[in-house]
Amino acid sequence: MIFTEPVFLLFFAVCWSVHWLLGSHRRQKLWLIACSYFFYGSWDWRFLGLIVAATCVDYLVAQQLERHTEPATRKLILFASLAFNLGVLGFFKYFNFFVQSGTGLLHWLGLHVQPKTLPIVLPVGISFITFQTLSYTLDVYRRELAASRSFLDFAFFVSFFPQLVAGPIVRARDFLPQLAHKPQLAGVEGRRMLLMFLGGFLKKACLADNLARAIDPIFAKPGGVHGLDAALAALSYSVQIYCDFSGYSDMAIAVAGMLGYRLVKNFDFPYFSRDVQEFWRRWHMSLSSWLRDYLYISLGGSRGSRWFTYRNLFLTMLLGGLWHGANTTFLVWGALHGAALIAHRAYRQALAARQVASPFERNAAGQLLAWWFTLAWVVFCFTIFRAPTLDRAWLLLGRLEVWSGTPKLSPDFWLLLPGLAGVHFVLSRHGRALYARVQALPDPAFYLGYGACSALVPYFMPVNAQPFIYFQF
Amino acid sequence: VQALRFAVNLALALLGMSLMAAALDALGPMSTPLTLDAERVLRERERCQVLFVGPSYVVSQIHPAAFDAESQRLASPLRSCLFGGTGMRGLELRVHLSRLLQEGWPALKLVVVDITLGQGRSFDQGNWYQPRLIQWHTLESARWIFDYYRSTHWNGLDAKVARAHLGHLLANQLNLGVGLEKLHLLALVRRAQRALGARVKLPESDARRAYRSAQAELAGRKKAQANAYMKRTSQRSHDRRVAQLIRAKARLRKTHKTVASDWLFELRELTRSHRAEIAFIEAPVWLARRTKLQRKAARALPMIDFNDPAKYPPLYLRKHRGNTHHVNWYGGEVYSRLLASELSRRKLVR
């Protein structure tokens, strides 16, 4: 069940109606937990056990962390939680990858062994669930958050279906306080949420899925493609992944909002960033802030020598890449971003040492150039991220210099991409004002228009819907 | 008050959605080989008197020119036309025939439907949400789909299949995926495409291109088959298959199961409502059916069974057969002439 399927809309209509009809807050929570389990079980009910186990383990661990004061004991308890959460993640997501990589390494060293891999099915959204529960345990360990006394509240936090399978990664300190008070229907920004859901739907179904249909064949068989097709495919993938993931995030925020809960923002026009650091502040914000708070800072952050900081930056991004999946392309993607962040940091430090301003910030041309460099870098990295193997990625990138023959991709792309960039730019500047104007329309105009626009979305959807890209992570 | 306001707003949204869906519906369906074939045959509707409808046994085996010439020779001149597509049968056939007839056929006297493939629903999971499958899930066909499953004692219908039928119906009502094609057909986009000079490869043109190439292939095959007979290796199996078919036909006359035939009566009602009679044919294929129509249908409905080597030996001569279930170009000529003479002999066209 994905947000763009009619069955989800039916499910949500029932879920939403019953939720607001229930009188007591406790019943509402129980109902939403049941809905969340149903939602997750619709993929594979066998993995419901994982959510239940993660809920029980982390609830108990947090209780114990709160009860004990001796650092050694608390560390031991924390280690138990980490072992469980990362063990589950490691087994389901990385077991076969490490076995195969290890075998490859031994083979390279001249030792021939038969790898023993397992036919493991990856539970949907396991990385998101793990990071979410880990953040809770770590916050309690650091005494930045009191352990939840209510098992019901904690189970609700872990399983809340809008963000369960693909984020945004919700922190317990942001979400648990919301469970203290019963949400009020009058407090729901209905129109804003409806617009956000429709906008997300449009981004995912009409833009991302149509782009995927056009560029998937190019990534599948990059040999022989025209340079322009290769360039457009690389650029289009960056647009696709943004529309896909930010579309999902918008829908998740809207669905949660309609139920009276607030989720954190996940994207902030990342393709207008003018350096890699800014990009990571605006792209998948819930993950990048998680990595910063729980990995980078845990590794020591910038509290050490310059090289120590660089090492932490690199390791954080490398593990961030690995979080996306067990594939060398993700590792290389993370490593490249780590290297870019180090380079950017070193450059800023060099400028600071000389007490000069960056030439990229002096005037509009410099800013434009900085934006262009950043975008080119991000697109280059996403090309590696998207390719099934590194070889294919190099093959596609190598085709960029082949300009003989005729491109196959439709010239519509040449019209579509600048058009999208234009709309994106206008929304980044005037989006709030536009939203406010639409929200202020009288009821008949708003709802008639909303219905009409809703009918337009399936009209431009491709017939075969694609799953969300981030579901695989 | 809040509930009332909610209900009114919901009704407004649904109204807006319906109005927009209706407006978009007027722009036409997504192109598939069948809609493109319908466009072609509709250009002939002013003069067409006999319309052949069915799967590839109609499209590639019946030659309208040969049929028309033979009917002229038999002193009952008729102009024929044909409509169909690979594997078209049952529910899909009904939907498209219904749509075609609604366009008005002033000269039409007879509709000849090939029922070799039976009533089948042609709804394999591997093809779900293909435009062709979405197209026959109309509000009108929802009742037919229900009747089909009821007549087969709900065989093959489980929750997943039922949900898929509902999904297809919804996709049809909301014109899922049609917009992109319509957008590409806009003059502005086409002009830009021409100006930029790139080769166009679009979902919409895929269907058109596939149809054009299928048409060209058909014409080419007819020409090629005029000089290419059945492979030598196939000849031995052909003789064996024909013998088997004759035996199977003989068995079928003695012991057989009957299948529900209400859908054939419904098809007759459909054509009669457009002032045309109907006839059913079975194509000269190698395999015999294991079932027969119910007696009332066999008696009441005009049925010509060409799937009978004993009765129509020319259709099973080696020189008239291709390498599949289909006859070759020469066989098609013979088949078309036989059709004309059978229709004339039975006085099906008045």
Image: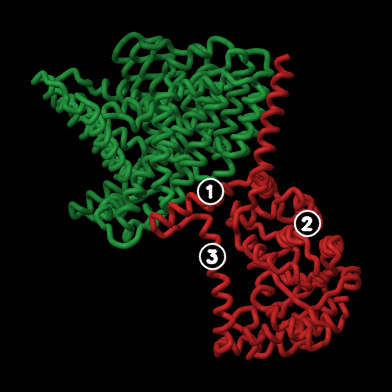
SS for callout 1: helix
- In the rendered image, the vertical position of residue A199 relative to residue A258, given as above or below: below
Q: Give the residue pinned by disc 3.
A: B210
Q: Which residue lies furthest to the left in this view?
A: A354
Q: How crowded is mark 3: few (under 14 residues within 10 Å), some or many (20 or more)?
A: few
- Alpha-carbon distance for marks 3 and 2? 31 Å
Q: Is circle 1 on the same chain as circle 3?
A: yes
What's the residue type where badge 1 is placed? Leu
Q: Mark 2 lies on which chain?
A: B
SS for callout 3: helix
Residue A282 in which image quadrant? top left
Q: Which chain carries label 1?
A: B
Residue in view at x 53 percent, y 16 percent: A153
Circle 3 or circle 2, nearest the eye: 3
Residue in view at x 65 percent, y 29 percent: A448
State which tag comes first along the sequence, 1 or 3: 1
Q: Give the residue pinned by disc 2.
A: B148
- Please identify which colour was used for chain A in the image: green
Give coordinates of residue A314: x percent, y percent: 22, 31
- Please identify which colour was used for chain B in the image: red
Q: Can residue A90 be seen in this view?
A: yes
Q: Give the residue pinned by disc 1.
A: B183
Q: How many labels does the image show?
A: 3
Give coordinates of residue B243: x percent, y percent: 71, 87
